Structures are given as C-alpha cells and as structure tokens.
Amino acid sequence: MHEEMHSAKISLPRFIGVLVANFVISITEVVGGILSNSLALISDALHNFSDVAAVGLSFFAEKIGNRPQDSKRTYGYKRAEILAAFINSTVLIVISILLIVETFKRFIKPEKIDPQLMIFVGIIGLVANLLSVLLLRRGSSESLNVRSSFLHLLGDTLSSVVVVLGALSIKFFNLVWIDPAITVLTCIYIIWESFKIVRKTVSILMQSAAEIDYEEMKKDIEALDMVKNIHHVHTWLGNENTIYFEAHIEVNDMKLSEVCNIATKIENLLKSKYGIEHTTLQFETQRCSKKDFFIKEEI
C-alpha cells in the first residue's frame, strides 16, 4: 500500500493546474455569491476551497514531511501534514456552522437573489471542476492518494451542477428557498467530512494506538524460537501511514549475536505482515516483574 500511494503518475504541472483551477473557482464563487446574494455559491466556494487545501497539503507534506530528522525533531517532520489538516478542517467546520446560521435567517426572511449572475458563476465553476477531474483522471486508477483527490473533485462537479440547477429554478420558478436549502446540504456534507478528518488527526496527535490485531501479533512473535514472551507494547502513528512500535522481548539466555538474529526476524515480521517499519525492541531475561502485553505506566 505504501508503494502504491507514492506511485502516482500525475505530473507536477497537472497538480498545479488543479490547484489553480480550484482556487479560481473559490474566489469567483465567493465574489459571485456576494454580488448575487447567493449563499449556495459561497458554500460551494467553501467546498472547492477544501479541495484546494487538500491538494495543497499533499505538496506541503511532501516538501516539509520528507525533511530529515534533526536535533530538534528527532522523529522528523511527518506531522506537518497532520497539523495542517487539523487546522484546515476545524476552520471549515466553523465557517460552515456560521453559514448554516445565516441560512436559517434566509429561510425566515428570504432575500432577493440575482439568478442570472448565479447561473453564470455556477457554469464557470462547473467547467473548471470538469477540467480538474480530467487532469487527475489518468492517475486515479494507479494511486490511492490521487484517486481520493479525484473523487473529491468529482463531488465538486456534481455540487456545481446542483448550484446551476438551483439557479435555473430560481430564475424560471422563483423558488428562492432552493438557495438556502443547497447551502445547508453542502455545509452539512463539509462538516461531516471535516469532522472525520479532525477525529483522525486528533487521534494521531494524541498518539493513539495503531489499529492492529495484537492477539495475532503476540502469537506470531511468541512462536519464534527462543522468544518466551512479548510485553510492554506501545504503538503510535507518526502520520496517517507511519506506525511506530516498541516492546520488551523476553528471551532465553543467549549470545548477543543470537539476539540480533531474533531482532531481525521480529522486525521483518512486523514490517511484512503489519506494515510497521519503525521498530524499537528491548531484550531481557527475567527482568520485568509485570509481563502484561499492555501496561499502564505510573506517572
């Protein structure tokens, strides 16, 4: 999976094209929403801006996150993407809530909307979204990362279609309630997707344990020759894909060279079966009085 996520066939100019197109959409829809008095356009701009941030984060993470470890950041800079995602998603949730509050005011007291301008801006957004989808389509089947961005942009395209249809309904049938209705639905979607990101990033920042079959892991490691038991296990995520692992391994009395061989076997097992590449093992013989797999540390 790790190789697949880094094997994207999308060139840098294509990604920049997607960023520019979505940034233009966002600015155009914000201005158009203000001038036409349409909250639907503003909420759609927010939706597009979330994708600008998402695509931009991949570049930000690659540039910052791949910096080598130093004396100040011994684990490196992998969490730069996590921090940026947390901030971006939190801001989107706050803005969406404010838009929903404003929308309910519109339901109570409808305001006049310029459907002509709303249609014009909505079509610009639709065309730019379609262009972005075409730019990412080639690599969407070869990379999970690119496919995720591709699906988000496809959702933006459908959102733009809804905005245009809503504007047409206002123009020809004077259904002004459609504008706040589209706004609420878009904001609820943004809040839902952003909340999932916030929950995931908070989990990583709080060093929550990786989702692994620990019972199976315990059986696998203790089945190795000369290994008596594994205990005091800790796992945590450096970022969404990097798992760190540390544990105490009790073995029989043996030479240091034999311990190194066992360490290699355990590291290979953890990497091949559980996707763990950063492993720290502490070997011992009858040292720890408590040999629970997980142990509550005393503060």
Image (cartoon, rainbow, N blue to C red):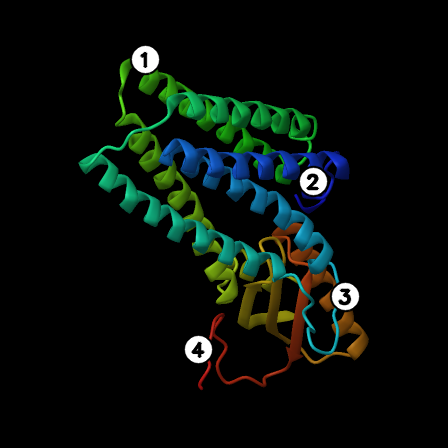
- Residue situated in front as seen by the camera: 48 or 175: 175
Mark 2 to mark 1 CA distance (whole Å):
49 Å
Numbered disc in front, either 3 or 4: 3
Q: Say if mark 1 contacts mark 3, CB within 8 Å.
A: no
Sequence-wise, the earlier of marks 1 and 3 is 3
Tag 1 residue: 172
Query: Which corner quadrant holds the C terminus?
Result: bottom left
Pinpoint residue 298: horizontal percent, then vertical percent.
44, 85
Numbered disc in front, either 2 or 1: 1
Mark 1 to mark 3 CA distance (whole Å):
60 Å
Label 1 crowd (10 A; few <14 / some 14-19 / many >=20): few
Sequence-wise, the earlier of marks 2 and 4 is 2
What secondary structure is marked by label 4? loop
Q: At label 1, which amino acid type do we have?
A: Phe
The image's mark for residue 4 is: 2
Mark 2 to mark 3 CA distance (whole Å):
22 Å
Say which residue appears at 58% left-offset and 42% top-offset: 52
Q: At label 3, which amino acid type do we have?
A: Pro
Query: Which corner quadrant holds the N terminus?
Result: top right
Sequence-wise, the earlier of marks 3 and 4 is 3
What secondary structure is marked by label 2? helix
Say which residue appears at 25% left-offset and 37% top-offset: 106
Q: At label 2, which amino acid type do we have?
A: Glu
